[in-house]
């Protein structure tokens, strides 16, 4: 298959104050193209594997040009459709304005997604025969963000499954996306989960997105958290017996500069657990996407659950140690060094 990973996505730009300043206090900003889905693709593309973003661009938009140039520089292929702007009140690419926080001042995110071009994504816009039959895709990744934006994206799963592509679904619940749409979105999410081979999310995601009546989250006690997630997954595996991999991250925020970071995977009915340990934070946004990207890279490469867990955990750490919201490893060894706590200088 040509592509290890592919994902439908709605691209935008992320604007971050420099020097960890607050949004309203800064007059210098760092701008990068962004989406949760391309954050996931970035781990595999950085490690030399072909990945594909399935997306839309606003025609003649300078923001679209920024995004295209950056995707090329990150080694991510894209197949796209252009949409006329329709005037200044028409379509545009999202703006994601986020500060990194500092100490006990939490990071904060201000999303501006009015008129987002990604809401027009449709399976009819793309040559699915070329993508899935002629080129071939190992894993199709769908995030809950894009599933909530466009219900059409869920139909990609059907075409993917017909052509031997595995489906990964990160539930990624966002209350602001679900307001007034619970019945509609729960139906869409349940349908996608019913076709997924890989399902990611915490207890709240499974309860709110899929309506599962499981255990309460385990509070701050680590053993209780792990047991609670295991109970939820055991319940989810009954409703979705085709899922081969369940996964979630474990994060405890000590400050904006330091978190405890762990992960749990159930793969082929075996549990793999990384208990949370301290990591330094430059910008926490994208840590979960980094984890998913490392995990899917490992699965796509056919690695054991143990290695997949290590690659996912370390990719999340790498994303949290950068102002970019994605991980860009130079090698698997670099990720494994991060996992093993080997921070010695490389000469």
Image (spheres, rainbow, N blue to C red):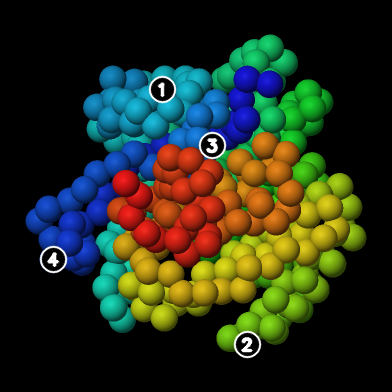
How packed mark 1 is, by other alpha carbons closer than 10 Å (few <14, some 14-19, many 20 or more), is some
Q: Residue at x 38, y 42 (%)?
A: 34
**Is 249 rendered above or below residue 200?**
below
Sequence-wise first label, 4 or 1: 4
Circle 3 sits on which residue? 44
Q: Quadrant of the N terminus?
A: top right
Circle 2 sits on which residue? 221
Q: Residue 306 placed where, x, y %? A: 70, 56
Q: Residue 276 placed where, x, y %? A: 56, 74
Sequence-wise first label, 2 or 4: 4
The CA distance from mark 2 to mark 4 is: 37 Å
Sequence-wise first label, 3 or 1: 3
The CA distance from mark 3 to mark 1 is: 29 Å
Q: Residue at x 69, y 30 (%)?
A: 138
Circle 1 sits on which residue? 83
Q: Residue at x 46, y 36 (%)?
A: 46
Q: Residue 20 placed where, x, y %? A: 22, 64
- Contact, mark 3 vs mark 1 (Cβ under 8 Å): no
């Amino acid at each position: 298959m040509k592509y290890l990973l592919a994902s439908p996505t709605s691209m935008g730009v992320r604007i971050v104050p420099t020097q960890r300043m607050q949004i309203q206090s800064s007059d210098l900003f760092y701008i990068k193209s962004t989406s949760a889905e391309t954050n996931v693709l970035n781990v595999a593309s950085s490690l030399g594997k072909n990945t594909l973003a399935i997306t839309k661009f606003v025609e003649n938009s300078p923001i679209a040009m920024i995004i295209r140039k950056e995707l090329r520089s990150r080694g991510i292929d894209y197949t796209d459709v252009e949409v006329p702007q329709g005037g200044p009140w028409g379509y545009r690419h999202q703006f994601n304005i986020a500060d990194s926080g500092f100490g006990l001042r939490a990071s904060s995110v201000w999303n501006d997604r009015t008129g987002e071009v990604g809401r027009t994504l449709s399976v009819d816009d793309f040559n699915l025969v070329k993508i899935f039959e002629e080129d071939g895709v190992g894993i199709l990744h769908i995030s809950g963000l894009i599933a909530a934006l466009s219900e059409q994206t869920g139909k990609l799963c059907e075409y993917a499954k017909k052509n031997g592509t595995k489906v990964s679904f990160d539930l990624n619940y966002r209350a602001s996306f679900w307001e007034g749409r619970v019945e509609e979105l729960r139906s869409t999410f349940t349908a996608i989960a019913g076709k997924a081979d890989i399902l990611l999310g915490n207890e709240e995601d499974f309860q709110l997105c899929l309506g599962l009546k499981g255990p309460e989250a385990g509070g701050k006690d680590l053993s209780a958290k792990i047991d609670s997630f295991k109970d939820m997954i055991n319940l989810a595996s009954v409703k979705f017996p085709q899922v081969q991999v369940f996964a979630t991250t474990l994060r405890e925020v000590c400050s904006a500069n330091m978190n405890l970071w762990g992960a749990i995977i159930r793969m082929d009915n075996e549990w793999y657990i990384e208990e949370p340990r301290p990591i330094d934070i430059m910008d926490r946004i994208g840590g979960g996407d980094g984890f998913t990207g490392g995990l899917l890279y490992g699965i796509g490469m056919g690695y054991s659950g143990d290695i997949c867990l290590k690659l996912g955990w370390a990719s999340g750490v790498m994303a949290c140690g950068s102002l970019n919201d994605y991980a860009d490893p130079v090698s698997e060894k670099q990720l494994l060094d991060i996992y093993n706590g080997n921070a010695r200088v490389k000469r």
